[in-house]
């Protein structure tokens, strides 16, 4: 089946909630993917920060195939070895004490919300329930995670959303201090906002957030679903800022392409979830956790986290070079290999033209191009991507900004 046929079937049978590119991907290897017509693309989307090791990493494939042949599912009525192995890897490489596994980022954030409320209401004997989140944040598409998300477009048509979420501007300490009251149980934020336009926490901001949480006796929870797992040049993005949150949520790259989410918590907070208080049928699935353990091992042993720092700096420099060349590029920002390019024009046409020339990127907002390549890319991959971008932007510049704005 070719691109057109697969697309026609999808348009006939699938709900219309995604805006899809006009091709069907059938194969991936390393930093490249192929569509059903045989075209090859350099992938700087990585499944939206999922394929941090590239596509079909041999160690992850081997771990999955081996586990599938032994045990695919057993439920959490029983222990399973891959789940325990992955838990050990996560806890021993962080300051946390316990982990809860689920299937996705939205589920991880839902779990964190429940954990925070239950910690205060059951462990502390308090009725605190409000959670402060940030404008331009993205925490998921369930009702509660949509309510937590600081973007009106995610809320539209789903009223009434669950109450208890308060939004403040990111990187604004005074606004946060004013928002926290006697009913607040936690602050949740992304160290680097991905979907909101690629905004990293400013120097000193997270230290101030930590101080506010400590002084008010509330929890600091970080959503690292997109920016975690080595993408920013540390295993966890919060490590750049010298803080120790009470809770961190993970997903996306954790499963290496399989559905897997996690809530990591310090001991005292984790005690809020006793038997029967929370659960997941597929959370901690043996195959997903085998993949996750292989991902963790590769990140820790193969120098990929350091490569994210080096290649992130190299890509940043190359994008800055384009900024100096083209007047419609307003800003380059981000951390590690989570980078954004803000434009004065609509980025959609650039995404389309790059795809036609063999490069996959996407827009984090209408005017922000987002770059999420695998962590094991080389300088040659960066050069290839920037060369395509340069050609596309050069052609648009010749047309005139008014025609592409």
Image (cartoon, rainbow, N blue to C red):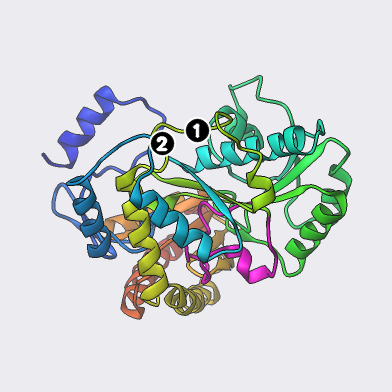
Return the residue nearer the eye: 156 or 127: 127
- The total of numbered circles placed on residues is 2
Mark 2 or mark 1: which comes first in sequence? 2
Q: Quick one: SS at disc 1? A: loop
The residue at 56%/51% (across/down) is 98
Q: Residue at x 39, y 49 (%)?
A: 83
Q: Where does the image place residue 186, in percent across and percent down from the top left?
A: 74, 44
Is 181 situated above or below 381? above
Labelled disc at residue 279: 1
Provide the major secondary structure of the magenta segment.
Answer: loop
For the question of whether residue 352 can be seen, the reply is no
> Local crowd at mark 2 within 10 Å, few (<14), some, or many (≥20)?
some
* Residue closest to the eye, 300 or 363: 300
* 136 is within the stretch colored magenta: no
Q: Residue furthest top?
A: 160
Q: Secondary structure at mark 2?
A: loop
Q: Is residue 212 above or below residue 79?
A: below
Query: In the image, 222: left or right of 207?
Result: left
The residue singled out by tag 2 in the image is 76
Bin the neighbour count of mark 1 within 10 Å (Cα to Cα): few under 14, some 14-19, many 20 and up: some
Q: Nearer the viewer, residue 17 or 118?
A: 118
The stretch in magenta equals: 221-245
Residue 303 x %, y %: 40, 77
Q: Identify the image quadrant of residue 294.
A: bottom left
| In the image: residue 294, left or right of residue 267 | left
> What residue is drawn where x is 89% and y is 46%?
178
Q: Position of residue 359 (x, y in %)?
A: 32, 61
Does residue 38 appear left or right of residue 197 in this picture?
A: left
Q: Is residue 379 visible?
A: yes
Residue 32 to residue 132: above or below: below
Q: Residue 34 vs residue 335: left or right?
A: left
């Amino acid at each position: 089946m070719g691109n057109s046929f697969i697309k026609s079937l999808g348009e006939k049978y699938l709900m219309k909630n995604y805006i899809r590119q006009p091709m069907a991907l059938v194969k991936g290897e390393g930093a490249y993917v192929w569509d059903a017509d045989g075209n090859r693309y350099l992938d700087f989307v990585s499944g939206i920060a999922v394929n941090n090791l590239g596509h079909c990493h041999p160690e992850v494939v081997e771990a999955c195939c081996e586990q599938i042949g032994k045990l695919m599912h057993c439920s959490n009525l029983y222990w399973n070895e891959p789940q325990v192995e992955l838990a050990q890897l996560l806890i021993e490489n962080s300051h946390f004490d316990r982990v809860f596994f689920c299937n996705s980022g939205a589920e991880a954030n839902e779990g964190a919300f429940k954990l925070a409320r239950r910690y205060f209401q059951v462990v502390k004997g308090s009725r605190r329930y409000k959670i402060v989140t940030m404008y331009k944040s993205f925490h998921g598409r369930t009702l509660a995670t949509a309510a937590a998300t600081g973007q009106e477009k995610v809320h539209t048509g789903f009223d009434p959303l669950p109450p208890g979420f308060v939004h403040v501007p990111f990187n604004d300490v005074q606004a946060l201090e004013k928002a926290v009251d006697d009913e607040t149980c936690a602050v949740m934020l992304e160290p680097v906002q991905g979907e909101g336009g690629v905004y990293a926490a400013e120097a000193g901001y997270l230290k101030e957030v930590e101080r506010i949480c400590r002084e008010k006796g509330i929890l600091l929870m970080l959503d690292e679903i997109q920016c975690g797992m080595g993408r920013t040049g540390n295993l966890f993005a919060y490590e750049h800022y010298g803080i120790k949150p009470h809770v961190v949520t993970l997903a996306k790259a954790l499963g290496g392409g399989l559905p897997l989410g996690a809530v990591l918590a310090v001991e005292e907070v984790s005690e809020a979830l006793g038997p029967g208080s929370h659960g997941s049928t597929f959370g901690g699935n043996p195959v997903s956790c085998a993949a996750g353990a292989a991902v963790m091992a590769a990140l820790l042993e193969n120098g990929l986290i350091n490569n994210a720092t080096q290649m992130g700096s190299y890509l940043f420099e190359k994008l800055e070079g384009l900024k100096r060349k083209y007047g419609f590029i307003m800003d380059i920002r981000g951390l590690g290999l989570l980078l954004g390019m803000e434009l004065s024009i609509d980025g959609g046409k650039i995404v389309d033209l790059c795809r036609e020339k063999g490069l996959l990127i996407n827009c984090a907002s209408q005017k922000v191009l987002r770059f999420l390549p695998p962590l094991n890319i080389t300088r040659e991959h960066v050069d290839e991507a920037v060369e395509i971008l340069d050609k596309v932007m050069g052609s648009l510049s010749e047309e005139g900004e008014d025609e592409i704005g």
